[in-house]
Image: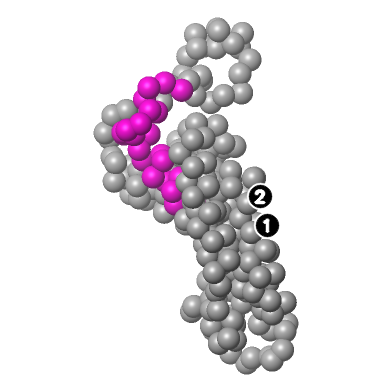
Amino acid sequence: MKVTTLLPQTAKLNTPFFFVLLLHLVLALAYSSLVPLGEAPDESAHLGYARFIANHGRLPATLAERREADYRADFPPLYYLLIARPLAAVGDAPPTQLKSFGDSPRRLIPFNGQTSAAFIHTADEAWPWQGLTLGWHLSRFVSVLFSTLALIPTYLIARRLTGQRRLAACAAGLQAFTPQVLFVGSVLNEDSLLIFLTGLILLALIGYTTPPPAARLKPYLCVGLAAGPGRHVKI
């Protein structure tokens, strides 16, 4: 179901919103390219889960495999299945590992054992990207895509509630240019997909809280489809 079917036929996306959409995409891509790998919260754990899927072609099935896939392995798998695709495409091209501080105590000596950084950033991460570096950046672009798509439900909700295109574009702009939204949406983090799915749920539900009421099944199906992948259940 297209999200635009939840709006009156007169409610169309406008030029200011497309400018917001494009500028957010450009900024998110810049963030994604410039933020050092592994320096976003839990990013190495997100990578570990996706790399397990990429290497084995399936989800972890045992407790030992979940430990191998890192501590995010009990999260809903949709996001990780998506970001595993570019990692699988790159395969085992070198470099296959980045230099982690945790690999050797010797790497902590210059910092007196006190560092919050996950990796030592070396020429392995430099352009042109290769191996794991390339796969990691391509997987980040999946987050950028969902971060950008998440602006569309925000615009449509504001347009439906206010009836004003410019105000709706401003609402989308507030989301688009919040620094933390740009940062989280540019790195490995399932929040970008979750925000997008949540927006779709709210957009579907709002059709039943504003007149005219509609006795249709499709919006409810949209809610179920969007809520299912975002469900977080620990086993």
Q: Is residue 95 toward the left or the right of residue 102 in the image?
A: left
Where residue 221 sits: x, y (%)? 54, 79
Please tell me how crowded label 2 is: few (under 14), some (14-19), or many (20+) other residues with Cα within 10 Å: few
In this picture, residue 44 sits left or right of residue 128: right
Q: Nearer the viewer, residue 3 or 178?
A: 178
Residue closest to the eye, 43 or 229: 43
* Callout 2 amino acid: Thr
**Residue 16: quadrant of the picture:** bottom right
Q: Quadrant of residue 154?
A: bottom right
Residue at image coords 48%, 79%? 1
Relative horizontal placement of residue 207, taking residue 224 as reference (left or right): right
| Mark number displayed over residue 60 | none
At horizontal 39% and vertical 45% (from top left) the residue drawn is 138
Q: Main secondary structure of the magenta part?
A: helix
The residue lying at 59 percent from left, 11 percent from top is: 111
Q: Which residue is mark 2?
A: 178
Vertical placement of 194 versus 125: above or below? below
Q: Secondary structure at mark 2?
A: loop
Which disc number belongs to residue 174? 1
Which residue is at a point 46% across and 23% down the rendered structure image? Answer: 121
The answer to whether residue 198 is seen in the rendering is no
Q: Are marks 2 and 1 in contact (CB under 8 Å)?
A: yes
Q: Quadrant of residue 170?
A: bottom right
Numbered disc 1: secondary structure? helix
**Lateral position of residue 173 relative to residue 54, left or right:** right
Q: Nearer the viewer, residue 65 or 23?
A: 23
Q: Which residues make up the magenta segment? A: 121-143
Q: CA distance from mark 2 to mark 1?
A: 6 Å
Q: Amino acid at mark 1?
A: Leu
Q: Give percent across and percent down for residue 24.
A: 54, 53
